[in-house]
Image (tube, rainbow, N blue to C red):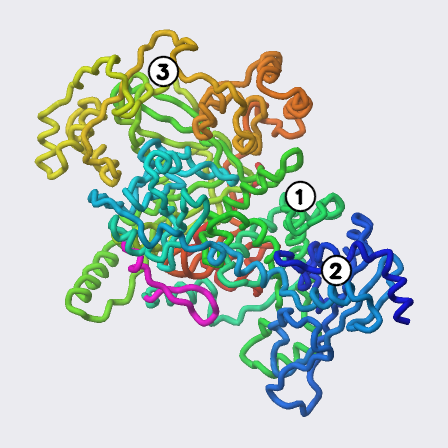
Amino acid sequence: MAADLGELLVPYMPTIRVPKTGDRVFKSECAFSFDSPESEGGLYVCMNTFLGFGREHVERHYRKTGQSVYMHLKRHVKEKATGAASGAIPRRRNGKVFLDLELNRDFNGEDYEYEDEAKLVIFPDHFEIPLPNIEELPALVTIACDAVLNAPSAYKKAEPESWDEEIQVSRHARSLRQLDNDVKIPPSGWKCQKCEMRENLWLNLTDGTLLCGKWFFDGSGGNGHALEHYRATNYPLAVKLDTITPDGADVYSFEEEEAVLDPHISDHLAHFGIDMLQILQKRTENGHHTDNNARPRVSEWEVIQESGMKLKAVFGSGYTGIKNMGNSCYLGTVMQVLFSIPDFQRMYVGNLQRIYDYSPLDPSQDFATQMAKLGQGLISGQHSKPPMKSELIEQVMKEENKVLNWHQQKGISARMLKALVGRGHPEFSSNRQQDAHEFLMHIINLVERNSAGSENPSDVFRFLVEERIQCCQSRRVRYAQRVDYCIQLPTPIEAATNREELLAYEAKRKDAEENMKAPPEPVRARIPFTACLQAFTEPDNVPDFWSSALQAKSAGVKTSRFASFPEYLIVQVKKFTFGVDWVPKKLDLAIDVPDFLDLNRLRATGLQAGEEELPDLMPPIVLPEDTRDNSMGSVDSPEIDEVAVMQLAEMGFPLEACRKAVYYTGNMGPEMAFNWIIAHMEEPDFAEPLALPSVMDPGPSTSDSPMGAATPLANSPPEESIAILTSMGFPRSHSIQALKATNNNLERALDWIFTHPEEEESDVLSDMADTEPNDNAFSNANSHSDSTLSPDRETSGPRVKDGPGRYELFAFISHMGASTMSGHYVCHIKKEGRWLIYNDHKVCLSERPPKDLGYIYFYHRLSSS
C-alpha cells in the first residue's frame, strides 16, 4: 500500500510545497466564502498556495491552476455525552490535527467536544488519503502535511505583523536633539507652513515645524514638504498630528525610511506643549474601549444599544451580523449600510460569479473578490438561519427573560477584507478603534480606484459643490465646483433649546470642581436640525485669501451650495473636537434629525446678474527670503491704517498680528480686521511679522528664465495622481493636462479642471501625442465612452447622478464613548418599513431607534411625484 501511495503521488510531487517562514496558511476560512473546517463540507487547503477553499469553490481553483493536491480539514462539533465531567477539556481524536486552529466561541463551553479529521484529496478523482499516514506517504509529503497542520492560521500570523507590532524602535529616539525655540503647537487650526494643506500634517520632533506629507493611494496627503525639510536639515523624526493617542502616535523616520517606534514620544511631544498622557481610557469587559469619565456616557450606551428591552432577533436575507474582531465595529457598521444599498448589491453580489471567475490566483488580495464575498455573506441568509423549534424551546427554558439567546446569531467575520483594505494604512491596519466616517471615505476611495472601466457603485454618493468666493473689498466673485461625497453639519451649541439648563449645569460643574464635590448629573444639549443646516449654509471666512482683483491678500468669504444632488446623501454630524489640552472629546448633544429632508432651496444658482467675476489670475510666486535675488529690488512698504492697528493692539492682540489683519482686509476698518484675527489666531505664524510676497516681472517668460510663469512639466505626471483624477470620472487626457498645468498639485488640478472645459477632441489628441506613449491612445479614446458617464453631465465633468433634493432617512451609524479613539459603533437600518439594529453579530428589530444620537446619517432620494 505504501508503494501504491508513493506511485500515486509521484506526478504531483513538484506541486507540493512545505510552508516557509512568511507563508500564510489559510486553514480557517475560504477565500471566496465563509466556509470553515466546521462547515458541512469542511475546508480544502491547497498544498501549493496554502489558500483555503470551501467545497463549492475548490473545483474552480483546480480548473484555474491545475493544482490537484489539497488537504481537507473537517471539525465535528457535538454535545458531550450525558454524565461527562464538567469543565473537561474538549477531546481531540487526532492530537496533531488543527493544533493551532481557533476554537469556535459559540461551542467552546462545557457542553461541547470536538472531533477533528484531516486527509489529502487528489483532484479531479477525489482520491482520499487519511492523515496522519506517516509510514505510507513519501517523506516530503509527510513533512508538508505536518507543517500545514501545525502552522498558525493566516490571521494569527497577521496579528503580530500589524502596524502596532512590526515597526521597530528608531535609533534616533533615545538621543533625539530638540531645539529650544519656544514652539508650541495649538490643538487646532493646523496647516502646512509652506502651503495651504490642512491634512496629512507631520510635526518634526526636532524643531517643531509643521509640514505636509506626500499624496497617498487613498487620495489623502500633501505636497511632500515634510520630506523636503528633512533633506534640508537632516532632522530625522516626525509624528503625524491626528494620530496622537494615549497609547502612542504614528512616527516616521526619514533617515531610516520607515515607520518607527519612539519610546520617548510623550517627552518629545511635551516639548511642544502636547500632553498626550492626559488622554486616559480603559477597556470594558466586552472588549470595547471606554473612558475613565464613564458617568456622562452611561445613558448614551443604554439608549443607543436599546438596552433593557426585549429585542426580537431576526434571521434571513439581509439580516446577518458581522463579528467584532476587537475594535472592528467601525468596519462592521459601515459595511452593513453599504450593502443595504442596491447599487453595491448589484455590483458585487449580482456579479459574484463573474468576479470569482476572473479573480487573480490569490483572491484574498483582490478587492472586488473580498467585497463580493462579504456582500454575499450578508445578503444570502446562509449565515442567518433561525434555530430549530427544539433549540428555541430549550433556550427559552434556560433563559426565561430573553426571547432568544444572542448565541443563536453567529454572524460572519470580515477578517480577510479588513486585512486587505487596511494594508499599508497606518490606522486601519492596526487593532485600534477608528473613526467610522474616515473609514467610510477610505472604502469609497477604494471602490473608486477598483471600478475603473466598470460600474462604480460609489457614484450614488458623488455630487458637485458650487463654491462662491467673494472678495470683501472689491465685491467681485469667483465660482468653482468640486467633488464631494458627504456633507458635514456644524453643531452650534449656542442654538440649543435647553441653553439655560446647560448654563446651570456648567455653573454647577465648575462649583463642584472648585470645591471638590461630586459632579452634577450631565445635561445633553438639544440642538434643532434646522439650526445645524442654517450653520452649514452660513458664509465662512477664507483663510489667507488672495484677491486677483487687488493683486494682494484680502478678506474673503465663501458660501457653498449643491451644484448637483446625489442619489444617496451622507450627512456627518460634527460631534468631535479637540480641547485646549489636546484631549479629543465628543460633544454631548442630541439633534432632532428628520425622517424627510428637502434641500432644493440649497441648489446652486451660478453667476448672478450684476455680479462681476474675479480675474482668472494665479497668485505671484513667493520665494524664501534666503533664496531671493537681490537684483530684483525691493517692494514698496504697504499702506496700513495705523489707527486701526493700534485699536486692535489695545485689545491685547500682538502688534504684528494686528498689522497683518489690517493689511489682509484691505484697510477696511478695525471690525473687519478683528474678524480676520478671530479666524487666524490659532495659526502657528499668527504673531510673526508681515511678510510681503515678491511680485515677479509680468513680462513674457522665456526658456532661459526659471523664474517665469508656471508652465507644464516636460515629463508626464505621476500615474498615481492620474489614477486619482480618472477614478472621479475625469477623462485621462484632461487629467494629464490639469496636472501638468498645476505642477502636479492634485488640489489645484481639480480646480483647473472645473475652470478649463475640455478642449476639442483634435486638440486633445494632439496633446496626447506629445505626452503619452502610442500604446495608450486606445485606452484614452475609450475614456470618452458614454457608457462610463452619467447622461446628464458633460464628458469633461465627473459622473454624478443628479436629481431632486428630497430625501428620506434609511440608516444611521451611532457612536458611544468619549472620542473616536474609543467606544463602540452600532447602526440602525430601515428595511421593509421597519427599523433594525445591527450591533456586531446581533441583528434585531429596533423598538426605539435613537435617531437624535446618530453620528453619520444616510438618506436616499425620493422619486419625483
Query: Residue 30, percent across and down?
Result: 70, 58
Q: Quadrant of the C terminus?
A: top right
**What separation in Å lies between label 1 and label 2 (alpha carbons)?**
23 Å
Instruction: Look at discs 1 and 3 and give the one toward the viewer.
Output: 3
**Mark 2 Cα shell of 10 Å, populated few (<14), some (14-19), many (≥20):** many
Q: Amino acid at mark 3?
A: Met
Q: Is residue 381 visible?
A: no
Q: In front here: 255 or 129? A: 255
Residue identifier under label 3: 707
Residue occupying the point 59% across, 50% down = 420
Mark 3 surroundings within 10 Å by alpha-carbon count, few (fewer than 14), some (14 through 19), many (20 or more): few
In this rendered view, identify the residue nearer to me: 598 or 156.
156
- Name the disc covering residue 614, or none: none
Three-letter amino acid code at the position of disc 2: Gly
Residue 276 in magenta stretch: yes
Residue at which label 1 appears = 347
**Mark toward the start of the polypeptide (1 vs 3):** 1
Give the residue at mark 2: 54
